[in-house]
Image (cartoon, grey):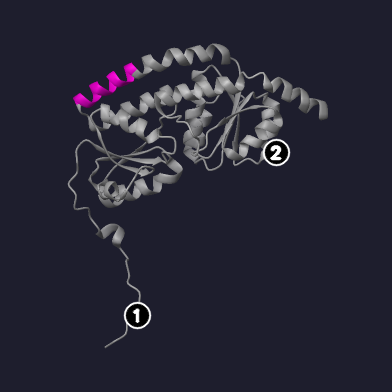
Amino acid sequence: MENNRNSSPTYRGWETSFKPSLKKEPLSINYMGDFNLAGEAWIIKGYLNQMGLKVNTIFTGDSNFESLKKATASSLNIVQCAGSMTYLAKKFEETFGIPYMKVSFLGIEDTSNSLRKIAAFFNDKGVMLKTEKLIEEKTKMAKPIIEKYKSYLKGKKAAIFVGGGFKAISLIKQFRELGIDVVVIGTQNGQKDEYEKIEEIADYGTVILDDANPSELEKFMVEKGADILAGGVKERFLSYKMGIAFIDHNHDRKHPLSGYEGAINFAEEVYTTACSPVWKYVKDGVNRYV
C-alpha cells in the first residue's frame, strides 16, 4: 500500500468552484467590521431590525459558528471598517454573488445617510418607511443634546489622526456638527479615493497628512492651533504632552461612539475634555519649562 503521509492535498480553485447551498434571504444583511467591544454592533443591529431587516452575521464581533454558517444566505454586506473588511466583502461578491456597500455610523449625518442607502438597496416600501421613521425619532432625540454641547464648543479647532480614511471623513462631519473646525487630518492607511474625498470636503488651508510621524503631527497641530486631537491609543501621549484635549477613537474603547446614541457620547466626551480647565494649567506648565 502506497504511503501518502507526506503528500498534501491541493485546494486550488476553491474560491470559484465552491457555491453556497443556502437560499438567499431577501431582507438580510451581514455587518462587517465591528469588533463590538463597546456594544456598538448591538446598537446598529437594533436599527436594522427596526427597519425590517435581519442581520445574519456580524464580522468579527459578536459572531459565532452558527451565525457564520448563515452568512452566505444574506442579500447584502455592509462594511463599517473598510481597511479590515473590504477584501472579505469583495470575496463574498466574487464567490457568492453578494454585493457590498461601505457605510459609516459615526455622527448623525453619516448614520442617517447610511441607513437610507441600505434601505434604498432593498427598494422595499415598508423598509424605507420604517427607516425614515427611525431616523426622524432618533434625530429628534439626539439633535437637542448635540446643539447644547455645540454652544460650548463652537469655534474650537480639531486635529484627526486615525487608521482609515473612511473614519476620518466621518469625523470631519461629526466635528462640524459640533461647530468645531478641523484643521489637521491624517490617516495611517487611507486609500487614494478616500484622500480625494477628504480634500473635497476639507476647508481651505486644512493640513492633510498621510502616515505622519509624531513630530510631523505635533508641528502642524501647533502651527494650526489645534485644541483637540482625535486619534488612537498612541496619539494620547502626544496630546497630553502638548497640553491638548484628547478623544479616544480606538476600537477598544469602553463606550459606544456609533449611531445616534454614539453621537451623543462623542459630543459629551468632546465637551468634557475640551472644556476642562485643566488644559490651561497644563499649557502654563509646558510653556514654563520650554
Give the mark, 1 or 2, whose residue is nearer the N terminus: 1
**Magenta segment boundaries in residue numbering:** 125-137
Residue drawn at x 66%, y 36% is 237
Residue drawn at x 82%, y 29% is 289
For mark 1, give the secondary structure.
loop
State the residue in front, 102 or 146.
146
From the image, tell me which residue sits under label 2.
215
Residue 254 tag number: none
Where on the picture, by quarter, is residue 16? bottom left
Is residue 149 shown left or right of residue 205? left
Where on the picture, by quarter, is residue 236? top right
From the image, tell me which residue sits under label 1.
5
Reply above or below: 178 against 32.
above
Residue type at mark 1? Arg
Residue drawn at x 41%, y 38% is 36
**Where residue 167 appears, x then y in whole percent?**
48, 34
Residue 111 among magenta residues: no
User: Most extreme residue toward the front, as rendered?
Assistant: 254
Residue drawn at x 35%, y 19% is 138
**Where residue 56 appears, x then y in whole percent?**
27, 41
Quarter holding the N terminus?
A: bottom left
- Badge 2: few (under 14), some or many (20 or more) residues near its Cα, within 10 Å? few
Reply above or below: 224 against 82.
above
Give the total number of marks visible in the rendering. Answer: 2
Is residue 26 shown left or right of residue 146? left
Q: Magenta: predominant secondary structure element?
A: helix
